Amino acid sequence: GESVGLHLPTLSVQEGDNSIINCAYSNSASDYFIWYKQESGKGPQFIIDIRSNMDKRQGQRVTVLLNKTVKHLSLQIAATQPGDSAVYFCAEKKDTGRRALTFGSGTRLQVQP
Amino acid sequence: DTGVSQDPRHKITKRGQNVTFRCDPISEHNRLYWYRQTLGQGPEFLTYFQNEAQLEKSRLLSDRFSAERPKGSFSTLEIQRTEQGDSAMYLCASSLAGRGPDTEAFFGQGTRLTVV
């Protein structure tokens, strides 16, 4: 069935380094791909999204890359900070029909001081 | 606090009991979603409302689960005859349809249910 999955369950980086979190998806019919951040004890928080007809989108310290050929999505975080420590989920969504987000299982980012 | 509010934050119940959770979305948001999240997993969609209309239900939403949004504002999620497998975090999210792709859902902090 449709699924959005992640390659690595845990990623550990040094403070100040760049982080790259990867995600593989199987539903090529999705219209949007989205990254959410979830800190301990909190609900997921929207970070950035990308429409399926784009291959790159930049935000503040974050960049999302979409490779539709290999159905791969990545989130790059520049100059990672301790406050970036959290679980990151990729999700996908369609413009029509099903309105809900379909989430993957998450990658834990640990930022070492 | 103008974010999504959920109550209670934690609920411990005995197997077989009924429980009800409440969600107050961001006031102008017309879409409201319920998700369930187990440890180490991403949220799984349960059901969604646009205003007071329940427009979609996941197959995860068995007949023991019922959700309402009677006036298009707050919502309740009731689980009847709880089972240990119902233990999870129940997340509510809201969004405003009609502005862009509606990919940014605002989540509450969730209600953690433990069935003993």
Image: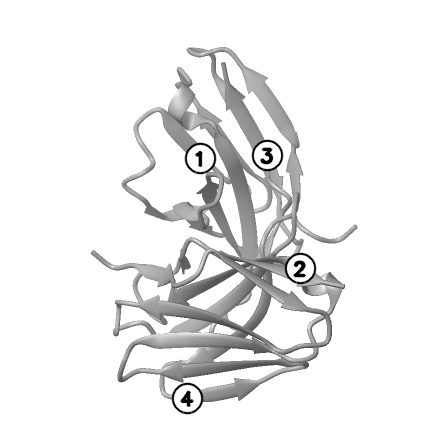
Q: Are marks 1 and 4 in contact (CB under 8 Å)?
A: no
Tell me the residue at 63%/28% (across/down): B10
Look at label 2 and name its amino acid.
Ser
Contact between labelled residues 3 and 2, with CB atoms less than 8 Å apart: no
Residue type, mark 1 in image: Ala
Q: Are the numbered discs 4 and 3 placed on the same chain, yes or no?
A: no
Q: Which residue is mark 3?
A: B111
Q: Secondary structure at mark 3?
A: strand
Identify residue for label 1: B67
CB atoms of marks 4 and 2 within 8 Å: no
Q: Which residue, given by chain and number where applicable, does mark 2 sit on? A: A85
Q: Residue at x 43, y 63 (%)?
A: A91
For label 3, count other residues whose C-alpha is less than 10 Å away and answer few (under 14), some (14-19) or many (20+).
Answer: many
Q: Quick one: quadrant of the N terminus of chain A? A: bottom left
Q: Is residue A44 visible?
A: yes
Can the viewer see residue B100?
no
Task: Say which of A13 and A102 sits in front.
Answer: A13
Which of the marked residues, 4 or 2, is nearer the chain's N terminus?
4
